[in-house]
Amino acid sequence: MHQRRLPWRDDPSPYRVWVSEIMLQQTQVATVIPYFERFVAAFPTVDALAAADLSDVLTLWSGLGYYRRARLLHAAAREVVDAHGGRLPSTVEGLLGLPGVGRYTAGAIASIAFSVRAPVLDGNVMRVLSRLDAVDAPVDAAATQRALWARAEALVPADDPSAHNQAMMELGALVCTPRAPDCPACPWVDACAAHARGAAHLFPKKSPKAPARAVSVVAGLLGRSLADDAVLLARRPEDGLFGGLWELPATDLEARRAPASPRAALARAFRDRLGLDVDVGPHLAGLTHQLTHRTLSIDVFRVTAARGADPRPSWYTEARWVPRSAPDAVPLSTLTRKVLAAVGAA
Ligand code: SF4
């Protein structure tokens, strides 16, 4: 089977494998490649990453989503430098001690970068194994996970675990695909229970999903003056959704206690979170944004404040006037980019 050419495979140093595996958690390979290349060009070593400002790390991560990964990667780099002399631990146990490194990532780094006989179980490998054994139990159940990890471990050879693990992941990505597995091209076609049943597409089985929760958000566009295009952006707290990223001041309506209206909720958010009294004017845009477990509906209003009013952030950790023509001066989420694009002409 052919392997795809991926930049982290050309030079599988522990640091590059680690960065790539953190980026690949929850993000597709094709999306990750340009982010990976920019990231390792800016921070070529663990020491460079540890010495960087978190905001520079977040800026390079901007658009990749799941920003907690970037914060944990940065914290882990500092830990590697402070506690491990700048070298990544080479065992699964040692790697598991680092922020943001779970069992899958530890197995991938240990096997690919250090040739340790450790299993990996990502979504691709899970799909292959669940089909190979026609696993009828939901794969997201804890007992099934344990069984799949044990199965994955039993398959790893002592000789070249890196090649084996990467081949398993490639098999899932390129051959044993979710909808149309190419069974005739699969080395396990004669051993595969799901294929024998003619039912490969029915695996893996999953527990029924909870529907995404609908959340209403109101956001305010506050310009500094008529003379320039700067708007007020505020930095969210480190913990929680979009932690540490900048946005137009906003609140979700659930966070407000029984607001009289979206406009009243927005005015209260400016007062409580930024110490600003504002008037909420016309509705500028409405858009939706899908997250894994939430569907956000965002309504953006123009707001005005008394001339020269200065924000005093409390819930927000910082506030800054940022040119609307160059908002990337601060790390933004994809959602904030969408919101700024939606009000671009406002
Ligand atoms: Fe997947 Fe088909 Fe191979 Fe079974 S035979 S592991 S279903 S590609």
Image: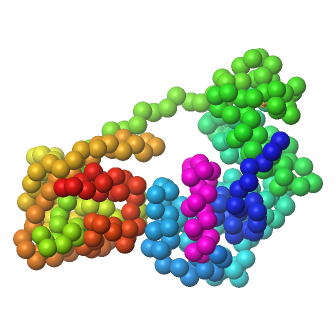
- Which percent across, then down, holds residue 147? 74, 38
At x 71%, y 56%, the residue is 6
Based on the picture, tell me whether residue 30 belongs to the magenta stretch. yes
**For the C terminus, which image quadrant?**
bottom left
Left or right: where 276 falls relative to 214: left
When the figure is inspected, residue 76 is found, relative to residue 177, above or below; the finding is: below
Q: Is residue 14 magenta?
A: no
Query: In which of the image's four quarters is ligand 1 placed?
Result: top right
Q: Is residue 91 visible in this depiction of the protein?
A: no
Name the chief secondary structure element in magenta: helix
Where residue 98 sits in the image (x, y, percent)?
A: 64, 67
Q: Quadrant of the N terminus?
A: top right
Q: Which residues are magenta?
A: 24-43
Q: Is residue 12 left or right of residue 66?
A: right
> Residue 37 falls in which quadrant of the image?
bottom right
Q: Is residue 279 left or right of residue 127?
A: left
Vertical relation: 301 (above or below) 222: above
